[in-house]
Image (cartoon, rainbow, N blue to C red):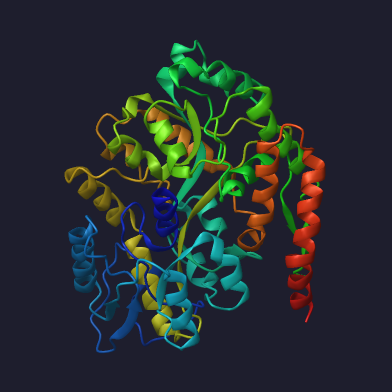
Amino acid sequence: MKNKVKLMSVLALTLVASLFMSACSSNNGGNNGSVNNLSGGDSTSTSSESDNVVEIVAWDLPQDGDPAKPYWEQVHKDFAEKYPNIKVEHVMQTLTKEREQFMTAVVGGEQPDLYANAFPDMESYIDQGITADITELWNNYAEKDMFLPSAIQAATKDGKIYGIPNFMYVTGLAYNKQMFADAGLDPAEALKNWESFGEAAQKLTDSSKNQYGYALLGTDWADWFFEYYVWQAGGDLTELQDDGTVKLTFTSEPAVQALQYYQDLKFKYNATQKNVVQSLDENINDFYQGRAASMIAPSNWFDDMVSSGMDIENIGFSVLPPGPGGTSPAQVGGAVWIFNPKATPEKQQAAFTYATYLMSKEVQDGLLQYQMDNGMFPDLLSVRTDVDASQFVEGMPHDLIESVQAAAGEGRMEYFLRSRLSPYVVKAIQQVLMDENADPLMVMQEAQDLAQREVVDKYNEEVKK
């Protein structure tokens, strides 16, 4: 479970690839003469001296165990020297229950001016008015076009901008190049579509070698990866309606096709691990040790792969094989710097200046250089298009970087209300993986009916009030 926990911690807490924790202040686009020459975050221009010092609170103090802590301490010092009229109070966030800590601060009127918020929470926080509208500041920001559109997506609603990208990852199919080569498989052909992948995974499975083609996630978080297959089939598991209510689509053709494919991978192609409900850690270990030829993985797991003994030259990464929908969307995750909507315009402007300084090419390149100098493996996907992590990793295969960037080209957020609906989807997945004769449509109908009664009806009633 440590890898899942690590991933979720990264989502809410880290700055790019480091363990740098969440940060400060808000911005609803205002500004006045109290803050002089803050430049909308243009890190190339120095703030003018002023008696009007603006104080902001940023939840970005690195943890004691963060290997990049010395770098961030230097960044904080450099910012203080460059912008003497902005005083940043750096606060260390907890390593666990970070959402609870943040919401306690919000309710108590002590929301930080800048905070690194996980992608999945953005829609809810925007609706609740927890994060400020920074559209005006963003539009005046000279480097706004240097950020990946998929990174901005999580902070955008109805054409307005509510945050600045902090870091991101993208999911794709990680595979063992040598195992594919030994089986005489061309990855480009094998990963062409669902059928070709099923056949390739079958060919990669050899019980005499304790080897199988695809580590399928069937444990408690099974819907985490399953939703990708629904997307590839052209659908989703829920639909958010115009009035804010939600409609379940478990029984839609794409969802049923995806579940049928899961069942086929297990029983038709015989290409998965025998114990399809083994833990995610066991799946990961099978892949790292060469027992599983492929598995879905986020782009920020390469460090674990290499530190576990895998040769970076032998790690392949690809967008997922397209399904019946003809596309292969991937989940994008990460964090966004959000701003306190109740802060003064001066504080919001100051926080914006500080956040854009942290995300400047200068600081991000500096982080990558520091990581390389200290033997740290970087996140291969930068939120900035002008920051190339491959230049800071010796021996990094260029095709790996290209594959990660390609996977980020068609990113999706997890299905709406996933935190409440996950148990119902997981149960359906496990039923078809444990019973070859289970009918995917019937299983999904049962799951949908139960979820409708126990979750969705209540949720929709609350929305309509």
156 and 16: which is toward the camera = 16
Q: Residue at x 73, y 66 (%)?
A: 455
Query: Could you tell whether 265 is left or right of 462 in the image?
Result: left
Residue 326 shows in the view: no
Q: Residue 311, how many percent across, how many down?
A: 31, 27
Residue at left offset 49%, top offset 50%: 148
Give the side of residue 20 with respect to residue 216, left or right.
left
Quadrant showing the C terminus: bottom right
Question: Residue 99: image x %, image y %?
Answer: 46, 71
Compared with 50, 280 (above or below) is above
Please identify the quarter of the rendering in which residue 442 is found. top right
Closer to us: 253 or 149: 253
> Which sits in the foreground, 37 or 65?
65
Q: How many marks?
A: 0
Asked if one can make out residue 462 in the rendered structure from this viewpoint, the answer is: yes
Q: Is residue 463 above or below residue 255?
A: below
Q: Is residue 151 above or below residue 160?
A: above
Front residue of this view, candidates 195 and 113: 195
Q: Residue furthest top?
A: 184
Q: Find residue 63 and report its horizontal and vertical position in percent.
A: 26, 65
Q: Position of residue 11 (x, y in %)?
A: 44, 58
Q: Residue at x 61, y 53 (%)?
A: 414
In the rendered view, tell whether residue 374 sits above or below residue 79. above
